[in-house]
Image: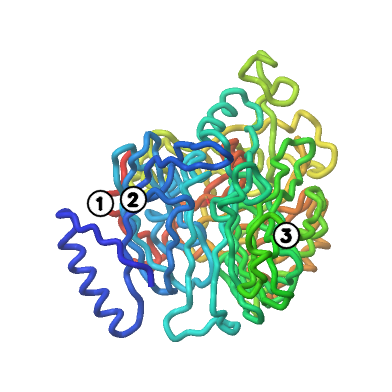
Amino acid sequence: METYNLTVKPWCSCLLIGLLAMNAFLSFFAIAEIQYHEFVVQTTPVKRLCRTHNTITVNGQFPGPSLEVRNGDSLVIRVVNRVQYNVTLHWHGIRQLRNPWADGPSYVTQCPIQPGGTYTYRFTIINQEGTLWWHAHSEWLRATVYGALNIRPKLGSPYPFSLPKREYTLLLGEWFDRNPMDVLKLALFTGAAPNVSDAYTINGQPGDLYRCSSQETVIFPIDSGETVLFRIVNSALNQELYFSIANHQMTVVGVDAAYTKPFTTRVIMIGPGQTTNVLITGDQPPARYYIAARAYQTAMNAAFDNTTTTAILEYKSAPCSSKNGQSSRPILPQLPAYNNTAPSTAFTAGLKSPAQVNVPTAIDENLFFTVGLGLNNCTRPNSNRCQGPNGTRFTASINNVSFVLPRTNSLMQAYYQGVPGIFTTDFPPVPPIRFDYTGNVSRGLWQPVPGTKLYKLKYGSRVQIVFQDTNIVTTEDHPIHLHGYQFYVIGSGFGNFNPSTDTARFNFIDPPQRNTIGTPPGGWVAIRFVADNPGIWLLHCHIDSHLRWGLAMSFLVENGVGESQSVIPPPADLPQC
Ligand code: C2O
């Protein structure tokens, strides 16, 4: 297992001794273990694309440290903020049952950790297996502050496929050749779309196709005949990606933290926030093969990073001549054209749960959420603060509400302490006006209303949400992420959702379980879940520019009956605003 990161400080030594005793007790019975980590958020020089950048990292590592745990383990992660920005960390996909205090979105479940401050995240992994990840959840810090969170089965419990000898984690990222926080700052000033990234990366490295990068290209060794598990995470800030390996089939065995019915494919589409586990067999002639990722771009007339990141799958028995020197370039895989939606649709349609699952068949809450961009008109169009299309400023919304984070408190702290005036609970269950969502939308409907509106759910209610993409500004694939939950994706399609015909085609047998799902561009996607996790949970587009523009809302899931259905008390060190 992961090495213990024990920095015993007087403030915690008693606690640590207690926890260690409990840990020893638990590991004696091979039940679970408690891992301690210290994550220092700091500035570290990182050289990429020929230049050295002061980069915000965790413990000086980029990407950050991997958390390697088992289902049932507990994590205690003390975060120290040594940078000039407010920071929080989010454990993407961890359910955090009754424990929103450990979830992390800034101003939603906690006030941020201020410069010089610390906060200890404590949580237990309950009935989740697969690949998740962690990332900063404060402005654009997640551009460089992220890492893997790999969850293996409990000791003695098998994988639902034969155990590969080797596992590799591939974190796909986006690299900016400047401070990402400055990119965001500029965009928020001008109202225009933010500058796009300068490179995609695999485990922090752009790869052979970029300037000054070929020395550091990541190499994944494989033996002939061997099967390896790739844990692929899209940690990119703003971009869906296509991913492929030259000459090799991939067998998909899991997405987010859930297993899937195995199916083979040559290409996967992975949206920001999503993870995909695939098996690869070394069944090709011993050589070197490129692993590559590049944009799947659905927004029309929008700038995007059109570069390709690569790593190398290298057979150990590959002839030496092919291993050194430029003489033999590995073969590049065929990736779909950036604007080709068909491979994404085919890949998503292939995802199924391994066996019949327990989807709620009756629902208590029937929600219909329009998701998309918008444009705010300016009193002085074309001033330097109105550099969006035709002298406007970009915005985004769900059901015409553009989500605004509170500044003086977090939603969860305000709710728990009964502080009034921080939020309201009148988020609309359906859009205020019905229109032809994916048709030609009249300009009068392009400007949403800002608000900090939550939607209340009774504990245990069975919820359906249909996310409907709109053609406001552009249709687009929006990777929608729900905190605190793992939902079933029961259907999707193109055009406007039609309840009378589309509901009949829902999959109640073996839909996949996910925590992040994209709306097909100009289409809809339907999910179901049971609201069995009390607290305040953010729902948002995982394209960070859209999140910042307001493509978000929050659920307030009320406590049920008794302690076991109620939010636990907040930890004593929870930061205050
Ligand atoms: Cu991975 Cu709210 O985020």
User: Which disc, if any, is residue 79?
Assistant: 2
Mark 3, residue position: 328
Mark 1, residue position: 572
* Secondary element type, mark 2: strand
**Mark 2: amino acid:** Val
**Residue 462 seen in the figure:** no
* Secondary element type, mark 1: loop
Q: Earlier in the sequence, mark 3 or mark 1?
A: 3
Q: Residue at x 71, y 78 (%)?
A: 283
Kindly indicate whether the residue at mark 1 contacts the one at mark 2 (C-beta within 8 angstroms): no
Q: Where, by quadrant of the figure, is residue 553 drawn?
A: top right
Q: Residues within 10 Å of mark 1 (few under 14, many from 20)?
A: few
**Residue 88 seen in the figure:** yes
**Mark 3: amino acid:** Ser
Q: Quadrant of the N terminus?
A: bottom left
Q: Quadrant of the C terminus?
A: top left
